[in-house]
């Protein structure tokens, strides 16, 4: 597919294109992993922390807030004691995650075939 045909107006290449911020959030390391982690269904905070090795509480909170604001993740807080909060994908979240899954599968397969050198 030609990039020129896919983006005839080239707006995504413009510094002030609104899609660039969204692309940055979705394709960040934690963004991709949060979306993929939620692909199989809702998870609570602790479930996400366990599933996504290495993510800090701060980065998880930031990513979830961002995705909630963008309409990709739904936060379901139930008024019970102790608090019960679940996170799930919205329709838009499922749509973008369906597109990310092949990329993540490719990355895992490629990393095995041609390991990337450790960087300092």
Image (cartoon, rainbow, N blue to C red):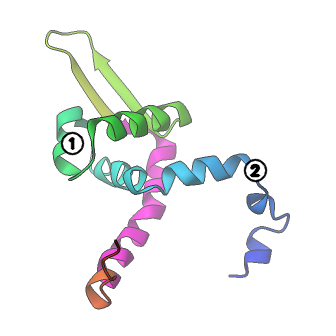
Q: In which quarter of the image is the C terminus?
A: bottom left
Instruction: Tell me the residue at 40%/36% (across/down).
Output: 64
Q: Could you tell me residue 8's position as x and y percent?
A: 83, 68
Q: Mark 2 points at which residue?
A: 17
Disc 2 is placed on an element classified as: loop
Q: Residue 101 placed where, x, y %?
A: 39, 65
Is disc 1 placed on a helix, strand or loop? helix
Q: x and y percent of residue 36 in the render? A: 34, 55
Q: What range of the chain is rendered magenta?
A: 88-110
Q: In this view, does 3 lie to the left or right of 9?
A: left
Q: Dot 1 corresponds to which residue?
A: 49
* Magenta span includes 82: no
**Residue at 77% in and 67% down:** 7
Q: Please state which of residues 60 and 34 is positioned toward the viewer in this rendering.
A: 60
N-terminal label among 2 and 1:
2
Please identify the dominant SS of the magenta region: helix
Position of 23 relative to 9 (above/below):
above
Of 43 and 95, nearer the camera is: 43
């Amino acid at each position: 597919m030609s990039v020129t045909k896919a983006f005839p107006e080239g707006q995504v290449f413009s510094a002030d294109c609104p899609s660039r911020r969204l692309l940055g959030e979705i394709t960040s390391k934690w963004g991709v992993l949060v979306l993929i982690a939620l692909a199989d269904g809702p998870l609570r905070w602790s479930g996400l922390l366990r599933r996504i090795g290495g993510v800090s509480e701060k980065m998880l909170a930031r990513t979830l807030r961002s995705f909630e604001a963008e309409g990709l993740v739904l936060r379901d807080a139930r008024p019970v004691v102790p608090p019960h909060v679940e996170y799930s994908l919205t329709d838009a979240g499922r749509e973008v995650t369906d597109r990310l899954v092949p990329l993540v599968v490719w990355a895992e397969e490629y990393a095995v075939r041609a390991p990337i050198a450790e960087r300092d």
